[in-house]
Structures are given as C-alpha cells and as structure tokens.
Image: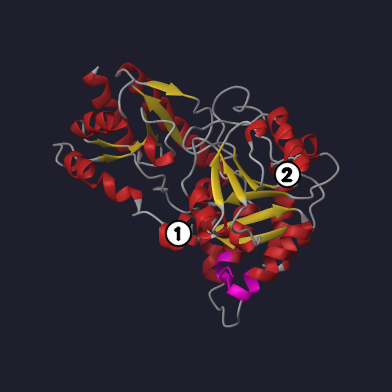
Amino acid sequence: MSIRDLDDYPWDGVAPYRERAAQHEGGICDLSIGSPVDPTPQVIRDALVAATDAHAYPATAGSVPLREAIASWYARRRGVPGLAPANVLPTIGSKELVALLPTLLGLGEGDVVVHPRAAYPTYEVGARVAGSTPAAADEPSEWPEGTKLVWINSPGNPDGRVATVDELRAAVERAREIGAVVASDECYAELGWEAPWDAETIPSILDPRVAGDSRANLLSVYSLSKQSNLAGYRAAFVAGCGKIVAELLKNRKHLGLMPPAPVQQAMIAALGDDAHVAEQKERYRVRRALLKPALEAAGFRVDRSEAGLYLWATEGRDAWESMDRLAGLGILAGPGVFYGGFFPRHVRLSLTATDERIAAAAGRLAASA
C-alpha cells in the first residue's frame, strides 16, 4: 500500500445526485459536506487583520502565546489541566495531521492503524499513504496484533457517537497493553445535543479520569473549523504526550509544516472567546431541531447523532436509493458507504447549511411523508 494505491476521490460519485437535486424548483438544499456557512466571528477576523505584517517565517511549534492559549483552553473547556507548551502543537487544519500522522510517527509495512467502523475516510488514507494496514474495529478486544496507532473519534463523524469516560479508559488500557499510540479526534466536542452531553463536557482522551496520571502515548486532535467557523483558516492543533509532540515537531520542521503567523494570532483570539462558540452552537441546535423530526416524519430512523454536526439516518434501504429519493426532493446528502462498508443503508445529513436551506429541506421532507 502507498499513495499510488489511493482510489478516486469518493465525492465525485455524488455528482449525478447533486445535478438532480439542483433541478428542484426550490433549488438545492446541500446537506452533504460539513463546511461551515456562517460568518467567522469578528473578534477572530480582527485578530487576523492586525497580524498581517507577517514578514518573518512563523514557528512550526507555534508562538508561545498560542501554545499557552491552547493549554489554557484544554483546562477551561475540556477538563484537562496541567498541559505545558511542550505538550501542544498547532497544525495546518486537522485533516493534514490525520493524513500524515502515521507517516510522521514512522509507521510502515506491517504496522496496523485501527480506526472506527463508521469513520472519516482520511484515517484509512493516512494508513495507506504510510504503507501501513488500516483496520476497522470499535472494540479494543478486536484490535489486531501489530496495532501501532488507534484512531478514536468522539463525537464521531459520521455517526455522532460519544465515547464515555469508561469506554475511553478501556481503550487506553488496551492500547497500553499492546504498546499502541491513541489519537483521539475530538473536533466536535463543543457540540453535544442529547443527555447527558447537552449539559456535561464531552470527555477528552487526556481527561485525568481517562488517562490517569500519565499522558504517555495519548494524543488529542482538535480543529477550530466547526466551533469557530474557521475552516478557511486551517486552524487546528494536537496535544498530549510530550515525547510524541516533540517527535512530531521535529519531523514537521523538516517538512516545512508551519501554520501562518496571522492564523496563529486568530487562533489565540478564538481560543480565548467562549461567547462566539455558544452563539454558533445555538445556530446548530435550532437547525437540528427542525431537521431531525422532519427526517423521522419522512420515514428515516436517526441513529446515534447525540453530538456533532450530522444526522446519521436510514430508511432501511440501500443508501444510494435514499440518496436518489432525497435528490428528488432537492436535498443532497452523503452516502454511508463513504464512511466504511459496514453501513450501506445509512446517509449523513449535515447541519452546515443556512437557516433558510435547513427549513426548506425540513419542509420538503415533511411534505413527502
């Protein structure tokens, strides 16, 4: 396996359904991709503008104020105290880290990279690029011999599943038994909807209740794209095991993976302001409250989806048939098969559309019931 073995980009296969949905007299309601549509908060934009005199190369490690802001954010928002600047590292968005982590860790042939059964495709892509073997498994007891890296995604994309403290602790204990690194993709952690996650903090892999008194071989990956509408900024970071963070920093220096200096300043502003996060969460809550019951009235069952930006739904038939039905209503979704071969009857619908488009989609679904 290598980068030469990658398939065509899967979203190209959605083009016919996009074309059909676009022919609807009321226009397309594109709920397929989780790309934010709401404005970037002004406090963040102002910080970016103020930092545009960026004549020098930025630090791959990130500025000291940025690393301190990341550590402070983990303590305040994620229940993870005690991180030092050496425990955190900014990245150029989270997707590049997901895709490159096996390579940056030096994994290769014979090494296994575990990811969830319902999974963001880049976990598998990253394993294949490194020449490693991807394996889909949710239960720690199912992790095969040779596992060197385990991806956890909580809240999950596409299914919105949240791992409890007990489940995360069991994963960490198993990883320690077999000597694997655990990387937890937590980029939807501010978006909990159903009890208890509507009131409780969604746990991090670095939470002391999970990790105990050691962060060795544990990494938390986070993106500001979702909570702060910064997808266009490519603003993310990784935190955890100081030894691994140092290794990642060394290798990223060689590769020139430097977050732009103005973006680093914007990240500091985003991490220090909780008000805009609450405002954005409320927008998504309103949209979800419209779309979920409309889907259910139209004959779909919504599975999991207790957190995150998506509704993971099935009407009990092939996903492509559901895609076709939705396209006939002018609604574009994502087929479950893009997230692994275990869910051929699910579709994923995103909350990242305008209020007007979400309302239009809900109305069309209700009318089709």
At mark 2, the secondary structure is: helix
| Residue that lies at the very extreme toward the right in this rendered image | 213
360, 17: nearer the viewer:
17
90, 191: nearer the viewer:
90
Name the quadrant of the C terminus.
top left
Whole-Å distance between the Cαs marked 1 and 2? 25 Å
Q: Assess whether mark 2 and mark 1 are in contact (beta carbons under 8 angstroms).
A: no
299 sits to left or right of 171:
left
> Where residue 135 sits in the image (x, y, percent)?
55, 42
> Where residue 181 sits in the image (x, y, percent)?
70, 49
Q: Nearer the viewer, mark 1 or mark 2?
A: 1
At mark 1, the secondary structure is: helix
Whether 328 is among the magenta residues is no
323 sits to left or right of 203:
left
Whether 257 is among the magenta residues is yes
Q: Residue at x 51, y 59 (%)?
A: 129
The magenta-colored residue range is: 252-263
Residue 163, above or below 246: above
Disc 1: which residue: 232
Disc 2: which residue: 76
